[in-house]
Image (cartoon, grey):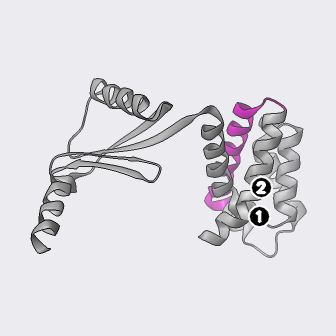
Amino acid sequence: MAETVTIARPYAEAAFKLAQEKNQLEPWSQMLDLLDLVVRDADVARCIGDPNVSAQQLQGLILGVCGERLDGAGRNFVEVLVQNDRLTLLPEIRAMFDQLRLEHDGVLEAEIYSAFAIDDAQVAQLVKKLESRYQRKVRAQVSVDSKLIGGIKIVVGDKVVDATVRGRLDAMSAALIR
């Protein structure tokens, strides 16, 4: 996986740089989302891996499916990916582009894991505290993890705030073993 990320990075950075220069971050996000969906389609994926499908045919297929939803630069991007046999990297390219955009916009992504469903007001309160702590806008994704027993765990980048019952039990267990 690290290899695909390494190969995808220059494509994502080039797309981001072009989108930023043209002040078209949102249209590029939409184009990359569309291309990601197209290459993940089972029929298209079979064509991508089929040695009997030429690069020209593959490019025609992708551009035909996307139609007018791709501008000239987007069409050129597809051509470069097809010619360099990099269409399968589109999911990674899109993810990296999104990450670059979040960094550009000064937004942190936070993953909030809760033992039980939490309401919008509680999420808003957590986001407000995180924004205050990190002095940046925070976009949170919330998911329920029944393995937690109780409490919440928040992951922001490489930092983890573990306020779960499971986390406390693990900490107590580790302290007793020492």
What's the residue type where badge 2 is placed?
Tyr
Residue 31 lies in the magenta stretch: yes
Q: Overall secondary structure of the magenta stretch? A: helix
Residue 129 screen position, x and y as percent: 35, 29
- Above or below residue 93? Residue 125 is above
How dense is the environment of label 2, judged by Cα within 10 Å: few (below 14), some, or many (20 and up)? Answer: many
Q: Give the magenta-colored segment's residue range.
A: 22-43
Pointer 1 with pointer 2, Cβ within 8 A:
yes
Q: Is residue 75 left or right of residue 3?
A: right
Q: Is there any visible trace of residue 58 in the rendered image? A: no
- The quarter in which the N terminus is drawn is bottom right
Give the vertical position of 165 relative to 128 (above or below): below
State the residue in front, 66 or 118: 118
Distance, label 1 to label 2, CA atoms, is 9 Å
Q: Nearer the viewer, residue 97 or 72?
A: 97
Circle on res. 86 = 1
Q: Where is residue 108 in the image (x, y as percent from the top left)?
A: 51, 39
Horizontal placement of 167 versus 82: left or right? left
Q: In this view, does 145 lie to the left or right of 45?
A: left
- For mark 1, does the 10 Å Cα neighbourhood hold few (<14), some (14 to 19), or many (20 or more) residues? some
Residue that lies at the very extreme toward the left in this rendered image: 176
Residue ID for mark 2: 11
Q: Is residue 25 magenta?
A: yes
Q: Which residue is drawn at 42% across and 37% down?
A: 140
Q: Which residue lies furthest to the top in this view?
A: 121
Instruction: Name the residue at 14% across, 74% down.
Output: 178
| x then y, percent, for residue 136 | 51, 31
SS at mark 2? helix
What's under tag 1, amino acid-wise? Arg
**Residue 32, image x, y percentages:** 70, 45
Q: Is mark 1 on a helix, strand or loop?
A: loop
